[in-house]
Structure formats: C-alpha cells, structure tokens
Image (cartoon, rainbow, N blue to C red):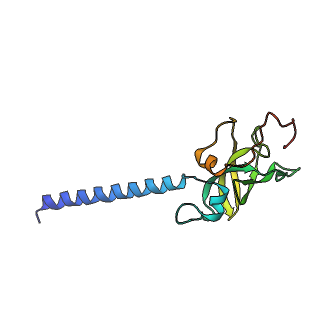
Amino acid sequence: MNPRRKQRLTWVAILVIGVSVATGLMLYALSQSIDLFYTPTELVEGKGKDKQKPQVGQRMRVGGMVVEGSVERDRETLEVSFKITDIGPEVTVLYQGILPDLFREGQGIVAQGELIEPTVLKASEVLAKHDEEYMPPELAEQMKGIKHVNPNTVEKGEGQ
C-alpha cells in the first residue's frame, strides 16, 4: 500500500473512532439527565403497550393529586411524606425541604426525584400547579373524575 494512502486511512480511522467516542459520551450524558414522566398508575402497573415498569434508582417525575389526610410532617426536620394518586394506586413521596405555597391536599403536584422502592419516590423537587385550569395533558387524561380542591374555597391553614 502506498505510504500516502496508508496515512490517509490512519487519519480517517482516527477521525471515525473520535466521532464515535464523542457521540457515545454525549448520549451517555444525555441519558443521565432525562426524567421520564409517570402517573401513579403507570408507575405501579407499567407504561406503554408492553407495560414497562421503571427500575428502582431511576430518576423520574411523577404527577398526581395529593391524597387527603396523607401528608405527614416531621416536627424536628423539614421531612415530609405524602401520597399521590390519579385514578388508581397511590405512590408515596418523601421530600425534605420547604414545600411550595400552593401545596395542599387535594391539589395536583409533580414530584421529581429518584425511585427508591417500586411505589416510593424520594423527591428532590416538588412543583405545585399554579393555575386552576392548567394540568399537563398526560395527567389530565388520567385524572378524569377525581375530585379537585379549589384553593380559594379552602380555609387558611387547612390542608397544611
């Protein structure tokens, strides 16, 4: 083989390997930052046609309504646990921190965190919906028929 052709082939091979490694690293980094959205029913029963359940340790977002009477607060720390539901099973959410002002029982929330048991999410962030009318389309479809508590009708201090 001609030395010049051999040198070109070497550079092309190095370039292909470099691009492959860069693409692989980029895909790996992106996979670490993807948070899939689940409803409590999808979390317990599986999502999609193949009913694939998330793995323990997976990062995700779970959205649903806070179950009445399920909020438990630790008086010594900022630890809070509560249950959320859509139309079926309940999922327990553990959170340490200050909850949003709009958080209350019967309201829709989205919790983002890591699944530590099949039905327990350790949340790093809890988002309470801020508009009475808006709800993510995926959640709205699952939540048809569930009683919604209007925050304007709840007396101050109730549900907190």
Q: Nearer the viewer, residue 20 or 91?
A: 91
Residue 24 lies, with reference to residue 158, above or below; the image says below
Q: Quadrant of residue 156?
A: top right
Q: Quadrant of the C terminus?
A: top right
User: Residue 75: x and y, percent?
Assistant: 89, 50
Residue 126 lies, with reference to residue 2, above or below; the image says above
User: What residue appears at the point 84 percent right and 37 percent down from the top-left corner?
Assistant: 154
> Is residue 5 left or right of 21 when viewed as pictured?
left
Q: Nearer the viewer, residue 70 or 8?
A: 70
Query: Number of callouts in the render?
Result: 0
Residue 155 lies, with reference to residue 11, above or below; the image says above
Q: Quadrant of the N terminus?
A: bottom left
Q: Residue furthest front?
A: 145
Q: Nearer the viewer, residue 22 or 57?
A: 57
User: What residue appears at the point 86 percent right and 52 percent down from the top-left corner?
Assistant: 74
User: Residue 7: x and y, percent?
Assistant: 18, 59
Q: Residue furthest left?
A: 2
User: Residue 157: x and y, percent?
Assistant: 87, 38
User: Residue 37: x and y, percent?
Assistant: 59, 52
> Is residue 12 left or right of 22 when viewed as pictured?
left
Q: Nearer the viewer, residue 153 or 112?
A: 153
Q: Quadrant of residue 27?
A: bottom left
> Is residue 87 left or right of 47 when viewed as pictured?
right
User: What residue appears at the point 60 percent right and 60 percent down from the top-left corner?
Assistant: 58
Residue 132 lies, with reference to residue 85, above or below; the image says above
